[in-house]
Image (cartoon, rainbow, N blue to C red):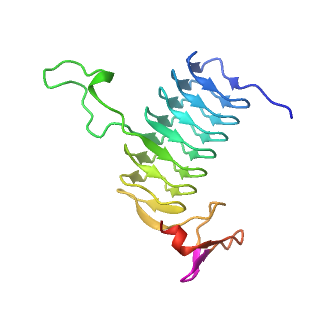
Amino acid sequence: MTTTAARIHETAEVDDGASIGEGTFVWHHAQVREGARVGRECVLGKGVYVDKDVVIGDRCKIQNRASVFHGVTLEDGVFVGPHAVFANDTFPRAINPDGSLKSEDDWTAEPTHVGQGASVGAGAVVLPGVTIGSWALVAAGAVVTADVPSHAIVKGNPARLAGFACTCGKPLRMENPGDYHCDACGRTFDAAAMHE
C-alpha cells in the first residue's frame, strides 16, 4: 500500500500540537489549532478554521471558510459546506458581569457530534450540544437547534424534518409503511430504523 504525506499549503497555519493524517490537503489560509486531530485523506478548503481539540475523522471534506469550533467531533466521511459554522457556546458573552474580558475558564464548550457520512450544507449553523446522525443531510442555510436522526433531511430555521436521505445522498421515497426506497441507487431502508 502506498501512502501520501499530508499536503499543507504554505499560507496555512497548522499548530505543532495538531495531528494531520496521511493524504490530507490543507489549503490556503486554513488554520488548525493545537490538539486538533484531522484524519486521513481529508480536504480542508481555503480559510477553514479548526479550533483546538476538534476531532475530524478520515475522508472528510470541509469547504471554504467553514468554522469548526472547540467541542466538535466529525466522524469519517462528513461533508461540511462553505461558510458553515459549528457554534459551541449557548450563552455567549465577550465580558463577565464585572466588565472583565471572558477567558477560556469562564465558559464550557458543549460537545457537538456529527455521524459518519452526514452532510452539513453551505451557510448552515449548528448550535452547541447537537448530535447529527449518520448519513443525515442538513440543507444549506439551515439552523440546527436540536438533534437530527440518522438519514434525516432537515431544512429551515429552526431546522425541521423534511424527509430522509439515502447513503448516496438522494431523497428516499416511502415505498410502503415498512420501508423507504431510493430511486437513484435502488437501496432500501427499514422505516422503523429511520425514525430512531
* Outermost residue toward the right in this view: 1
Range covered by the magenta-colored residues: 173-180
The residue lying at 51 percent from left, 22 percent from top is 33
Split into 4 quadrants, where in the image is the N terminus? top right
Q: Is residue 161 left or right of residue 104?
A: right
- Residue 189: x and y in percent read 61, 71
The residue lying at 25 percent from left, 38 percent from top is 91
Residue 15 higher or lower than 42, as above or below: above
* Outermost residue toward the bottom in this view: 176
The residue lying at 67 percent from left, 74 percent from top is 183
- Residue 26: x and y in percent read 64, 28
State yes or no: residue 175 in magenta: yes
Residue 29 higher or lower than 128, as above or below: above
Occupied quadrant, residue 60: top right
Residue 155 higher or lower than 181, as above or below: above
Question: Depth check: 172 or 11 in front?
Answer: 172
- Residue 39: x and y in percent read 64, 34
- Dominant secondary structure, magenta: strand
Q: Report the number of numbered marks.
A: 0
Q: Is residue 184 left or right of residue 83?
A: right
Residue 28 higher or lower than 147, as above or below: above
- Residue 76: x and y in percent read 62, 44
Question: Depth check: 178 or 48 in front?
Answer: 178
The residue lying at 49 percent from left, 55 percent from top is 138
* Outermost residue toward the top in this view: 16
